[in-house]
Image: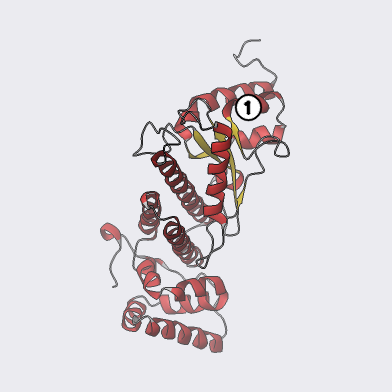
Amino acid sequence: MGGRGEAGSLTLAQLVVDAIRPPKAGRVAAALAAVEAAASAADRLEDWRRLAKENARLAPFIASLVDASPFLRDTAFADFGVLLALLDADPAARLREICTRVADLARCADVDRRMTRLRRARAEAALLIGLADLGGVWDVDTVTAALSDFAGAAISATADFLLDEAHRAGQILLPHPGEPSRGSGWILLGMGKLGAGELNYASDIDLIVLFDPAKPLAPDVVPQTFFVRMTRDLVRILQERTEAGYVFRTDLRLRPDPGSTQIAISTDAAFSYYEREGQTWERAIYIKARAAAGGPALRARRAALVRRLRAAAAGAPADGSR
């Protein structure tokens, strides 16, 4: 305990400043007693006291956090060892580690176990980001970027898991089985706040799901039916509430003409819609979208469409001629 994080960098405990308005003295005492009780129940009381002694601002900060946020209090107390590990790590390095662990979940064959671990990673990321935010360690841009980065990691890992499962079942012939999303033809675009890298704590995630019907599926597999089912499975894994909670509420309604289209649509249909029928706001959010999975396959076509949309908005031909 009491180290300096990764490669000599400062730990979260060392970086915390007095960023939360402290509660009244009686509530501080009650909060500190609750912290000590949780540490004792986890058999980590001495570790907590040592860390608090080495970092004078830490105990008052944690007391204020416990008093102010029931969610962060419950998350911290659910696994006190995780709280101590977060406090004793460089926050940016720890977030990268969490995202790496999430990516590795794509290789977990048990769906229920994977869902549980993904939800625990979500709780750990939320606690880390909340500590860094309320502790004055990260500014608002860093906080929203961190929330968005975790969301991207969760979406990508879930897509890889489902693609690998379909590949093993012989439903899709992945050109790069070790990187399931690469060349799969299944494209997940983060829209809205996710697309802009500006998720907040209460945000759901907006996705547009596209597929390339030319990608190699088994002869008896219909592309539309297959990718719609895959999309439903992805949404279920991310937003279904279990005993471990949920990962993200997921909204697919920003896709082209959501009242009459399936939740996964072909790239040809999407590009045709945006170019010929899309409203200005729809084109704007599409231009700002970021790929959450399957992005490289879309990049060239999307870039060409964006050029055409921008030219149309400016009243100029797509090739720049007059």
Query: How would you rate the neighbour count of disc 1 (Cα within 10 Å): few for under 14, some for 14-19, many for 20 or more?
Result: few
Q: Position of residue 301 (x, y in %)?
A: 53, 24
Residue at the far top in the pictured view: 322
Residue 44 appears in which quarter of the rendering? bottom left
Q: Position of residue 132 (x, y in %)?
A: 46, 63
Q: Is residue 198 visible?
A: no
Q: How many marks?
A: 1
Position of residue 79 relative to residue 92, above or below, is below
Residue at the far left in the pictured view: 7
Where the N terminus falls, by quadrant?
Answer: bottom left
Q: Which residue is mark 1?
A: 269
Query: Which residue is depicted at the point 70% across and 19% down?
Result: 315
Residue 311 appears in which quarter of the rendering? top right
Residue nearer the viewer, 310 or 205: 205
Position of residue 145 relative to residue 9, above or below, is above
Residue nearer the viewer, 123 or 225: 225
